[in-house]
Image (cartoon, helix red, strand yellow):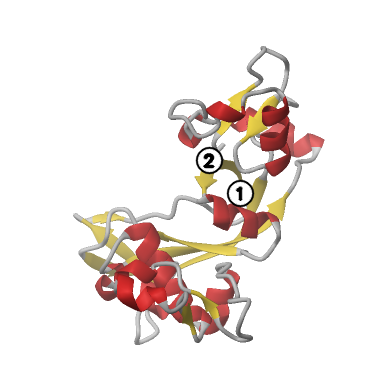
Amino acid sequence: MKSISFIEELQREVVARQKTETRRLTDPQPDDYLRNARGDFVLPDGSRVDLLARRRIVRPRYEVGEIIYIKEPYILHPLGHDRVFYKYDQKDIQELQELEYGDYLDKPGFWRNKQSMPARLARYFLRITAKHGERLQDITEEAAKREGVRPFTSIEGHYVHYCPELHFTKEELVDGYPHCSDARTSFRTLMEMLEGPGIWEKNPFVWVYCFEFLPELTTSERRFYNLTKR
């Protein structure tokens, strides 16, 4: 079973059903394209194509209809009980504090790396409902909202600036926290935080995956993916 992961803030938006699609850089980035009627990418002239990298077709990681699980930092019960604690769950954090593990929560090595999480320990799942390819800057205002960028609470219609230290000096930030006048600009700063400065200007090819949040799988779905009940 394939997996996906998010930073804590974006995972909260996924669980709250505020984030329903995600953009992931194509890997590798293409150096050419092949005209193909079933291509996932659409060129500016409307042609559907398959992207090529070193003469090999660049394929998406996920397919429509596929169910994937969300990886997140976790730890098995310190006393060996049949219990999993999740770092992004405030109830779990509180329970660990009550078990007197509060001093260890921020120490390196306490939480298991999210990439090591097996599917059988996952609590959240996504069903891929649509996919296509585009350039990063092709994102629309409505699509940026579906990416889960947060509204700026103090000003209606404005959105969070995720990377202020990249665009403002320390002196400029003293007067207040910056914000974005539209969701698309907010998404740009989110990508800069996730992928580094200059990612927007590079305008790379990305896969766009739309998904449906699944808090639990059916018995038949678990059987299909060979998952035992936690």
Specify the quadrant of the image occupied by residue 42. Answer: bottom left
How far across and down, in percent of the image, does residue 23 sit? 46, 63
Q: Are marks 2 and 1 in contact (CB under 8 Å)?
A: yes
Mark 2 or mark 1: which comes first in sequence?
2
Q: Residues within 10 Å of mark 1 (few under 14, many from 20)?
A: few
Q: Residue at x 56, y 56 (%)?
A: 9
Picture disc at residue 2:
2
Amino acid carrying mark 1 in the image: Glu
Q: Which mark lies nearer to you, 2 or 1? A: 2
Kindly identify which residue carries mark 1: 66
53 and 121: which one is in front? 121
Q: Nearer the viewer, residue 59 or 24?
A: 24
Q: Using residue 194 as the reference point, say whether residue 157 is left or right of it.
A: right
* Residue occupying image coordinates x 55% and y 50%: 8
Task: Look at 56% across and 28% down and name the residue there.
Answer: 103
Helix, strand, or loop for circle 2? loop
Label 2 amino acid?
Answer: Lys
